[in-house]
Amino acid sequence: MRNSSSARLELQSLSHSYARGDEPALSELSLTVEPGELVALLGPSGCGKTTALKLVAGLLRPTAGDVLVNGHSVVGTPPEKREAAMVFQKSLLFPHMSVEANVGFGLRMRRVSREEASEKVKEALRRVRMEGFADRKPDELSGGQQQRVALARALVTGPRLLLLDEPLSALDANLREEMRGLIKRLQREGGYTTVFVTHDQEEAVILADRIALIFDGKLQMYDRPEAFYDRPVNRAAARFFGATNFIEGHAENGSVKTRLGELKLQSPARPGEVTLTIRPEAVRIEGGENSFPVRVASATFLGTQVHYTLEAHDTSLRAALPPHVRLAVGDEVTARLPAESLWAIEG
Amino acid sequence: MRILDKRRSNLGLTLVAALVVLPFVPLVLWTFAGEWRFPDLLPSEWSLRGVRYLLEPGGKVVSATLTSLLIGVSVALASVVVGLPAGMALGGYEWRFKGVVIFFILLPILVPPLASTMGIHLTFIRLGLADTVFGVFLVHLVPTVPYTAIILTSVFAERTGELEEAARTLGANPWQAFVHVTLPEVAPGVAVAGLFAFLISWGQYILTLLIGGGNVVTLPMLLFSAASGNDPVHTSALALVFAVPAILALIVALRFLKPGESGGGRGFLGLGKVS
């Protein structure tokens, strides 16, 4: 299962429309996935991320743009020659074949000798801890087991690219966590260049080396997971990662004039109109730099955190505070937006 | 309540079974009757005359059965060979003028066979196909191909093509994906379509008579001439032989059509499982 030929994947201005004249499902997607890297294509359903994956797999032909594997265009290469194994949301095991025959399918198609194939299938099933199930039919397995077999089936041929299309979304919460760990472990061990499609922001953060956030068929931001929290490029990216505070203002001389007063930023914004964002959990109830009086408008107890809505000067802020900070609705307190947690989105 | 329901449904099943089986009772009795006169309830004498008539070595019943089987099996195979690509194209893809094509495929069922066969007969005479087994085989395809095409269309309409996509990414070329994934998946539907075609051919009288011109003797030909004669023993024996494949085919088809069975099982006519 070890993969000697991890590939570098490049998408160049990749576009796709399902029918002529239709709004493109994907437009001008450009990104590079380094060998052995796991990249998550993240976005709401219908944003074009599955389309992107199918273009890489060769199941769709791009209307424009190019897909390069190790620097060579594969747009004209049929899916079976791309060595890009795909795992789908549904396990899509072949119902008339045993688990063993399912996992060995790719090897049979490549005319690998029977003994060698049998060894590889055993090894693959062992890796996903399904070795006792070789003779079962897919409909005798649970959803999680089916998905593990599907993963073994994809990895057994040692693909250059591993493409995962929401492989966890059909599983329940516990299984999802376990499967997530398994995918991460196998991906690291095998060093597969992996593209993982998901609509679950948490899943993307946990699994991915880098995340490509896609809205409406367009790439919004492509960066390491931390960056989506620390320095989102636009409101959509910030909001998708739970930063719900947006404060409009005008930047000059290293600070930003807003309705909440003059706020200082650690990394100064370019002069002009800006929108500041801060994560709810970064808001402090204390005095000092960037502080101002607020009124507590609502409080929701969530166990490990309490979510508050704070109001000041017709602006409302969300704050997520530890439970020991006890605020009651109607309290007048001082809130502070630490300079190091404020981030300016241009425009 | 539930027990009562069950009893009631058992009663219903028994009734239906009786309605199916009862017409065969006099046929079986007549087949083995030696002497059966009005107003006796049962034959007064038994005989194997009917069985001897059926099995007579070199007799016309054996040869007619073989001819019927030959034509029926060939028609079933040919209908599937033609109907399979048609079903794939109609059920699996969307394209312009699909409705028009479906209309033309169904046309042979809609037009009375007598009307079209008159014309076909003239053409077949010119081509030397009239009065031949091959000619009869060809004319049987007229009603069977539309049925198989429509059955297989519904089989393919149920498929999403996702399994084939999975197979492609695993290294199967389109042909391998078709052979290793599509075919085993649609096999039950194909079998049902083939059975339908066989039964339609097996029961064909008029088309065989017109194109075969009396030279091609199938079971229905014998049955009709026996029925217009006055030997109920021969007629009953022939009728039983004639019914056997239909009953066998039905049993096999029901096995394939068993709803709720995952894997190979398809709903009725591949139209999906009822749940």
Image (cartoon, rainbow, N blue to C red):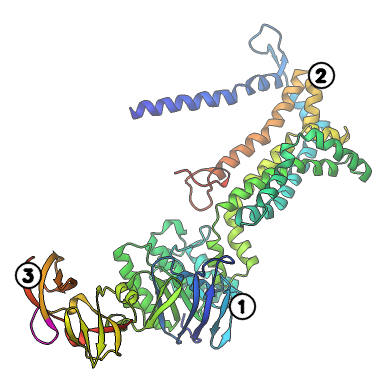
- The numbered mark 3 sits on a residue in which chain? A
Magenta residues, dominant SS class: loop
Give the answer, above or below, for where B110 lies relative to B95: above
Q: Quadrant of the N terminus of chain B?
A: top left
Residue at numbered disc 1: A77
Q: Which kind of residue does numbered mark 3 sit on?
A: Leu
Of circles 2 and 3, the one toward us is 3
- State the residue in front, B42 or B17: B17
| Label 1–label 3 contact, CB within 8 A | no
**Is residue A195 found inside the magenta-colored segment of the image?**
no
User: Residue A76, image x and y in percent?
Assistant: 62, 78
**Is label 1 in a helix, a strand or a loop?**
loop
Residue farthest toward the bottom in the current orientation of the protein: A253
Residue at numbered disc 3: A327
Residue at numbered disc 2: B229
Sort mark 3 into few (<14), some (14-19) or many (20+) by Cα contacts within 10 Å.
Answer: some
Q: Does the rendering let one see residue A36?
A: yes
Q: Which residue appears at 38% of the width and 27% of the height?
A: B5
User: Residue B127, image x and y in percent?
Assistant: 92, 45
Gap between marks 2 and 1 measured at Cα: 70 Å
Q: Which residue appears at 41% of the width and 84% of the height?
A: A37
**Is label 3 in a helix, a strand or a loop?**
loop
Q: Which of the 4 quarters of the picture holds residue B140? A: top right
Q: Which of the 4 quarters of the picture holds residue B208? A: top right
